[in-house]
Amino acid sequence: MPAEAVTLQLGPYAGSTGAHWWGLQAAALRRPAEAAELRSSALLRPAHAPGGREVHVPRLVALQLKGTGGRGRRGGARGGASPTCPHLCCRNGAVAAYLDTGSQGTGVPASGSAEARGVCSDAGGTQGPRPPEQDAPSPCPAGPGAPPGMGHWCCPEGLGTDAGRNVPLWSHHPNVQLHPKSLYIIRQYMHDGYGLEAFAQGEGLLQDPACMEELEDRLHYFTEECDSLQGFQVLCDLHNGFSGVGAKVTELLRDEYSGKGILSWGLTPDSHRNAYRLMNTALGIIHLSTHSSLFCPMSLGGSLGLKPQPPVTFPYLSYDASLSSHSSAILAAALDTLTVPYRLSCSQGSILHLAETLNFSGRKVAAAWASVPFPALHGSSLPDALCTHQDVPWKLLASCRERRGSSCFAQSVLLWPQRLCVTPCTANQQLRVPSTSHVLEQPCYTPAPYPQFFSPRLSRQGFLLDQAPPSSPAAVESIPVLAALRSAPVLHTLLYGLYKDLQQLNPRRCASFFSAGLEQEDFQEALHRLRTLSQCYETELEAEESDDEADSD
């Protein structure tokens, strides 16, 4: 039986990805228990919704900016009520219900959520919780759109994520319940206004003793109830000041929970590129990889550098890379697959075991590949599906162009095959590289509010049809997904390319970035560490090319 893990979500894009991920968890929970190959208790904890009904909520601490967690962009009611709903959901319960209400609504937090409990104030202090009797509870009855076992929901007519609409606020689309201890709203910075832009600003937040005490209190709440804590999952924005928050959070976890696994995911949307974004990303990679057992940067953007590149494309998805609700949904499906090894009911694997498979010889950064969905005909075998492609049909999710036929040092391969006939041994033979692999019978479930951006050539179960149906296709309820974590030479291309781009920046043109509290000497040291880290992934040919380049300099 897998041990428990605690998840941290740091930043708006990490929150959006996490929201989709928890939605996938909730969808899997609604399936027959005998089909469950993954132990939900690895990531979820039991809680009681209003009425005494038991539900499962994420073992989660989410740090978000004011305006992204439980309150709308404009005119959100005090106390967290949605402007489209007069009710305050689950005020008397132990969980808070959050509902997608489209671009005009907001999520609805409980009175015990971070909006009402301890939050980091503008003055650096904390505001204590309001007494429950001041919240004037008005429970909202579960509507017809409420999924079974998911508690009370506000405004059920708003269920679902509109695939054609950009929904940047993560609280707009997680149809899951959260524990009151989960949401921690940072009030010094606004999501839609004065945001958290620089690495040093993020670091500075957690140098405030009140903020650190609040974070530690929430962590202790979730960790102390675990029977056997295996470690932490950290989902962190890399491109903004939350990279600095992630640096301090992972340092705290390493120091306070020695011996526990820390698996960190650095998430970046495909959005406007500038010097701040590059510097935040580089500093985040260095610090998160240093403090974590394993670190994996993930993005659908074509490049981390200033020069734009086309985003990653998937042959059976019609997604808009500029919409965070789309790109984060794809990353969530990949995350749900990549984290299988330490969630299996029949395995003793852990976060630390997975990290140690890949992080030898100083290689603490891994890259992710995914096929979303994995292209297969109903009833076909994995060898048949792989043989129809010259290479394994997955895409690199690391903002870097992959060389054709590239190799790897080690990898962990995962597949939700939806009854594809295959054994792990067969998978290894077909992938032709030393691997640890896991193959599951159950698929990745994708009901609403997961975006319906799938090709009309996909069946309801996510299999390829011979041709698109003449009428409107049915909603895709599940998909097969193939994904892998790999320690590979492509990471030299990614890390060294970022180093070279930053070498060309003029620090004097980024004075405001350094005025936030970062010394230029510290930044130069981080660049040196970035280049050293990139050398861990060099092949002999790349090492020779680097030597030639150094000689020419």
Image: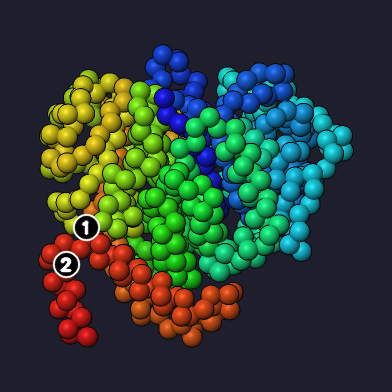
Tell me which label, 2 or 1, sits earlier in the chain.
1
**Residue at left offset 45%, top offset 75%:** 523
Q: Residues within 10 Å of mark 2 (few under 14, many from 20)?
A: some
Q: Position of residue 316 (x, y in %)?
A: 31, 39
Residue 126 shows up from this direction: yes
Q: Position of residue 190 (x, y in %)?
A: 66, 59
Q: With respect to residue 308, does 384 lie above or below?
A: above
Q: Are marks 2 and 1 in contact (CB under 8 Å)?
A: yes
Is 422 on the left or on the right of 157, as rendered? left
Q: Nearer the viewer, residue 467 or 178?
A: 178
Is 129 on the left or on the right of 225, as rendered? right
Q: With respect to residue 47, does 192 lie above or below?
A: below
Q: Amino acid at mark 1?
A: Pro
Q: Nearer the viewer, residue 199 or 72?
A: 199
Image quarter of the N terminus: top left
Q: Amino acid at mark 2?
A: Glu
SS for dot 2: helix
Q: Quadrant of residue 503?
A: bottom left
**Residue at left offset 25%, top offset 44%:** 411
SS for dot 1: loop
**Residue at left offset 76%, top offset 32%:** 91
Q: Position of residue 44 (x, y in %)?
A: 53, 31
- For label 2, the residue is 542
- For label 1, the residue is 489
Q: Position of residue 160 (x, y in %)?
A: 55, 34
Is 454 on the left or on the right of 96, as rendered? left
Distance CA(mark 2)–CA(mark 1): 9 Å
